[in-house]
Image (cartoon, rainbow, N blue to C red):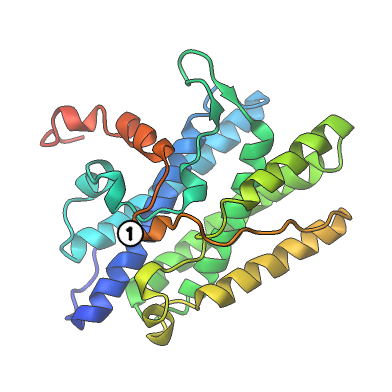
Amino acid sequence: MSHEQVELAPEYKEAITSLLFQLADDDFLFAYRGSEWLGLAPHIEEDVAYSSISQDTMGHAAVYYQLLEELGCGKVDDLAHLRPSSERKNSILVERANGSGTYMERPQYDWAFTVVRNYFYTLAKKVKVNALQHSSYTPIAEIATRIGIELHYHLLHWKTWFVQLLSSTEDAKVRMKQAIDQVAKDTGDLFSLGKYDELLPSANVIDSSTTLRTSWIAELEVVFNSIQLPIPAFSDISLNGRNGEHTPDLDAALSTLREVYAIDPHTLW
């Protein structure tokens, strides 16, 4: 896939580039955290479904990185694997580890946390993708329209898990409520647009962070009300991944993700 190159005003191009890195890095890390559940999901059907969702999501990241390559930012694989954590623009929520331990040795992963994170993130992604379908930057609008089709099913999957676990046993409800409180603390930068918080909306590239967040909370409230649960208090920004501020979890994830590629970046993978 390639798009006709159109000369962009410098500031507009910088803003578009920043947004694309946010979208790509979010999906890249989110897909990686999903891949860590391979073979560990609660049952075989979920293992297959979750693997498919993660694969779709990594594909979305690749498409955004491809747009960045076309804008002259570097090779797709280099952008995905070789950039240090200080250059990453993903949200804090997607970089958090699934739990303690390691995948190969003793993965002490938290399914309740994963379900809540995945539902909150996927709904946030849907809100953004819906807005991007009307973007003034045509390549993003075209991609958002295609991604939106797959995203419908991803969201349905995680919403189903979310509602069912909160309507299940007392133990499940306790674990889910703890996970909701935990995830809510990491949503401060989820809709931040970084240094382009004003320029991107004014150029009609995407809605403002306030508008996006308001839409997200409104959709969450419908679901929380349906299961008679109060919506959590969402924290303000403490760390802003859009500005390169991250946790040690990101460095650990990137170390694993780039391990093979870094051996010989010139190899055709």
Is the residue marked by circle 1 packed among few (<14), some (14-19), or many (20+) residues within 10 Å?
Answer: many
Position of residue 189 in the picture relative to residue 78 (left or right) = right
Position of residue 12 in the picture relative to residue 74 (left or right) = right
Vertical comparison of 226 with 6: above or below = above
One can see residue 1 in this view: no
Residue at 30%, 73% (x, y): give it.
Answer: 15
Residue at 69%, 41% (x, y): give it.
Answer: 179
Position of residue 245 in the picture relative to residue 48 (left or right) = left
Residue at 35%, 71% (x, y): give it.
Answer: 195
Q: Relative to the observer, which residue lies in front, 134 or 100?
A: 100
Residue at 57%, 67% (x, y): give it.
Answer: 127
Position of residue 49 in the picture relative to residue 261 (left or right) = right
Q: Relative to the observer, which residue lies in front, 87 or 49?
A: 87
Q: Quadrant of residue 115?
A: top right
Q: Relative to the observer, which residue lies in front, 17 or 242?
A: 242
Please identify the residue farthest to the front as the structure is shown: 238
Please identify the residue farthest to the bottom as the structure is shown: 202
Amino acid identity at mark 1: Phe
Pointer 1 residue: 21
Where's the N terminus, which quadrant? bottom left
Please identify the residue farthest to the left as the structure is shown: 266
